[in-house]
Image (tube, rainbow, N blue to C red):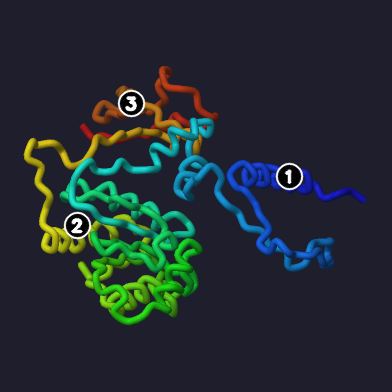
Amino acid sequence: MRACIGRPFAWQEALLVTAILLQNFNFTMDDPSYKLHIKQTLTIKPKDFYMRAHLRHHMSATTLERALASTSLNEPEEKIQHQANPKKAVSGKPMAIYYGSNTGTCEALANRLAGDAGNYGFRADVVDILDSVKGNLPTDKPVVIITASYEGQPADNAAHFVTQLSNSKDSELENVSYAVFGCGHRDWAKTYQKIPTLIDGLIEQRGGKRIADMGTADASHGDIFTEFETWEDKIFWPKMKECYGVSEVADGTPLESSLDVEVSTPRSSMLRQVSNPIVRIPFRRKSNHPSRTYEKHASRQSKFSPPQEPQRNVTSRYLYHQT
């Protein structure tokens, strides 16, 4: 009787996953007062024991995703953090951006909006989670909220904000000017855009002034950023200019600070594919028949291109010509 041949591979995968998790997360008990109870099915395990994972080193979900997908995993943390946070505009009219996000998509959209603000005469003084502003929405600047629904529930970092907003009193937000953008997936039809719609409606009911119609993005289309940019360019910024005007700079100084761009080429290393130049060598030969000529084209890999895995890289075809 022999053991399962896949068991060593499963152990190796488990070790790799555990190492990656411990490298990027801190784990704490969900219930500090938990007392151990044993549950046994095929194996022995703790019953009803849950843990919470917190990203280490103040890293965001989008930063972690970028680091895991990057070809340079040993890139210094300071550089990654610097790239993840957009530079604030040096001048312009102030605004505040808050997001609710579990996977990092809404956070990325919030950072995108903050980065674009300088081009329209505004600056994002605040880009933070919704729970940081529960019960204290700014009244001295426009507020933009970008959030999503997760099976009809708010994001983990927006749950307290939604609860407090639901329990707020009438006219409590009468001096708040706001706009809402929601992300969702239409396959969850019953709860699609539930939380963004709830926030948009509650703020209006509590006396808030809506700057622009709520924007939405459907993840099932696979192009959330394009839908967000369409709302941003065609609806949100025109309304912002209409309500607040545009900040002018007398000395011609650009409203937005410089932008650092880093270009990487992960495709070759991740897919292990190399785009090699192809050399086409035509040659002709005469047939025995005086009125016919055969033309042969051979396409082969250039000897100067990098080595590849063995493959059939010589193809030929014959073209028949009647002369």
Disc 3: which residue:
280
Count of numbered marks: 3
Give the residue type that dot 1 points to. Phe
- CA distance for labels 3 and 2: 47 Å
User: Is 107 situated above or below 291?
Assistant: below
Give the residue type that dot 3 points to. Arg
Give the residue type that dot 2 points to. Asp
Q: Which mark is residue 9?
A: 1
Q: Tell me where residue 7 appears, x and y as whole percent.
A: 78, 48
Q: Residue at x 33, y 23 (%)?
A: 281
Q: Tell me where residue 310 appears, x and y as whole percent.
A: 54, 29
Q: Residue at x 49, y 40 (%)?
A: 67
Dot 2 alpha-carbon crowd within 10 angstroms: few under 14, some 14 to 19, many 20 or more: few
User: Is 265 situated above or below 168?
Assistant: above
Residue 219 visible in the current orientation: no
Q: Tell me where residue 62 appears, x and y as whole percent.
A: 45, 48
User: Is 251 situated above or below 60?
Assistant: above
Mark 3 residue element:
strand
The answer to which quarter of the image holds residue 20 is top right
